[in-house]
Image (tube, rainbow, N blue to C red):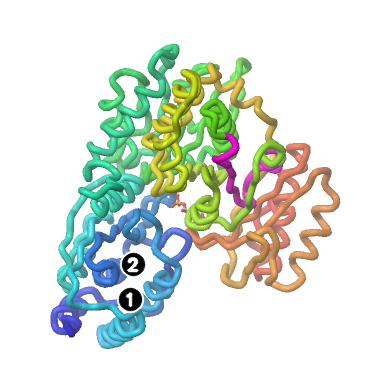
Amino acid sequence: MSQLPIESIRSLSDTHPKPPHIRFQYGTAGFRTLGSTLDSVLFRVGVIAGLRSKKFDGQTIGVMVTASHNPEQDNGVKIVDPRGEMLEAAWEAHATTLSNAPTTNDFLEALDALVRTTKIDLSKPARVVYARDTRPSGVALVSALEDGLSAIGAEGRNAGVTTTPVLHYLVKAINTKDTPESYGEDSEDGYFQKLGSAFQSLVSGRQPLEPLLVDCANGVGALAALSLSGCLGGSLPLILENTAIQSPGALNNACGADYVKTMQRLPPSLADRLKPGQRACSLDGDADRLIYYYLDERGIFRLLDGDKIAALVAAFIVDLVKSAGLENEVKVGVVQTAYANGASTKYLSGRLPVKCVATGVKHLHHAAEHFNVGVYFEANGHGTVLFSPATQAKLAAHQPSTPAQSTALNHLMNLTRLINQTVGDALSDMLLVEAVLAHRSYTGVEWDSLYVDLPNRLVKVVVQDRNAFRTENAERRLVSPPALQAKIDELVRRYDGGRSFVRPSGTEDVVRVYAEAVVRSQADELAFRVAGLVYDVAGGDPSKRPKEFL
Ligand code: G16
């Protein structure tokens, strides 16, 4: 039985000491905090990813260095499992434990325990593919990661600067290469070619699409969107905005999907660029979230968020399934979180099964796997569509009995190629939306009118300890701090159509408060009053209480 390469790990680990007094946590989207504190975490993640690969008999594991929607000074890292999916929950806990071992000796002991408890055969090979976004701190962090890979003797493949979804795709493409399940060529270009050809087939014969304005959040999406546009054969003209990846501090700053969704307004940089009626969308810092919007004829901003994308896409797939003659065999379902606008849940649940789960792509992804076709979107623009393996086999075997059935079946097959089924991808989702709009002959206005959003507000509250906040019922209710939920309930009752919930963020050191109500001013007031309750209960300094928290 092989042993851990103790000496190699020891000498390299000593050059990446854990900073004292910081507790790391593998959260909603991996480790995420100030980039300058993450050196030891990246080294250790390199070692862990190597062990994870050995556990899977040498299949390739992915590592993405990104902090996505967070500000530029933050960074983070997440591990991707062999099928291109998020790391298994049990290993999130192992990663947390290992990242917090105070010394090299403690780290070695924890590694040894992990190898024994999870029965890893150390004689197996280890392969890891990794990439980073455009954050300046990413360069040094990748180098720490490479030290970790070298310490455990893993073979590393550097995928360079790319998006999170491309990295997920690469993992699956590498692990299925030359097998009957081959997911495509294992390169970024291979991925974009695949998307481009599926998109062109889907929109062929339709009215040419008007140019789409894309806010790239001054992040890696700018590079990816440029490459993708070269694979679209002119079928969708893209106008790329906020592409300043070299400008310090520009990433996600007053632009990007999180800004647009949270502020419910246009990025100021687009104010003179967007014409009334023109479609626009925003990506986030690692291009896995997508938010659409337009200005109506009076120049008023209209948001088309993840909920609106889910409604558009789910209805389209249901219609195609029906037209293909498969309605009795293929059932479509939708997965949302508590952030889903109440109006969207009402609209969708009148038509399809809808499930609500906790925030975090992995929760939605797992729930969506229970449907034949699972459409999942968080309101913040993260999402994709999963076609179960049995459904894909059914589509491949189905014999259409009319030309109309054959066309619909073809469209469905192209959708399975267009949609990234490992994780949500803003660019793949963007093509999906554009394909549906082309088929429906919808502008933003018709899409928007599927249902009318309830006014809503999202507020962040800085508290002493966000871990004091614990939830139940898919994060819709608080169980701790005690008595806070009863106070929230009491407040909510006073607002027409009121709904509000409180949960700790898994990616930022804050507690989030969501509220909606029938009238805009009431939604705002409810959100700020609940935020005030949170602030007081969580021991905020009364002299620093934000004035809007009534
Ligand atoms: C990550 C997760 C998402 C989640 C978001 C916000 O997104 O992947 O599933 O919705 O964080 O999570 P929280 O409210 O817990 O901070 P991203 O785009 O930042 O990677």
Q: In this view, does 200 lie above or below 456?
A: above
Residue 483 or residue 118, whichever sits in front: 118
| Alpha-carbon span between mark 2 and mark 1 | 7 Å
In contact (CB < 8 Å): disc 2 and disc 1: yes
Residue beneath disc 2: 37
Rendered image quadrant of residue 448: top right
Q: In this view, does 154 lie to the left or right of 425?
A: left
Residue 321 or residue 106, whichever sits in front: 321
Q: What stretch is highlighted in magenta?
A: 327-345
Mark 2 or 1, nearer chain start: 1
Percent coordinates x, y for residue 48 in the rendering: 29, 71
Residue beneath disc 1: 19
Mark 1: give few (<14), some (14-19) or many (20+) Cα within 10 Å: some
Mark 1 residue CB less than 8 A from any atom of ligand 1: no
Percent coordinates x, y for residue 415 in the rendering: 42, 33
Q: In this view, does 427 lie to the left or right of 146?
A: right
Give amino acid for label 2: Thr
For the point 36% across and 42% down, the residue is 250
Q: In this view, does 25 lie to the left or right of 150?
A: right
- For residue 138, say whether it is visible: yes
Q: In this view, does 29 lie to the left or right of 118?
A: right
Residue 157 or residue 83, whichever sits in front: 83
For the point 54% across and 53% down, the residue is 370
Residue 509 or residue 282, whichever sits in front: 282
Rendered image quadrant of residue 5: bottom left
For the point 73% across and 37% down, the residue is 520
- For residue 427, say whether it is visible: no
Give amino acid for label 1: Pro
Is residue 123 inside the magenta stretch? Answer: no
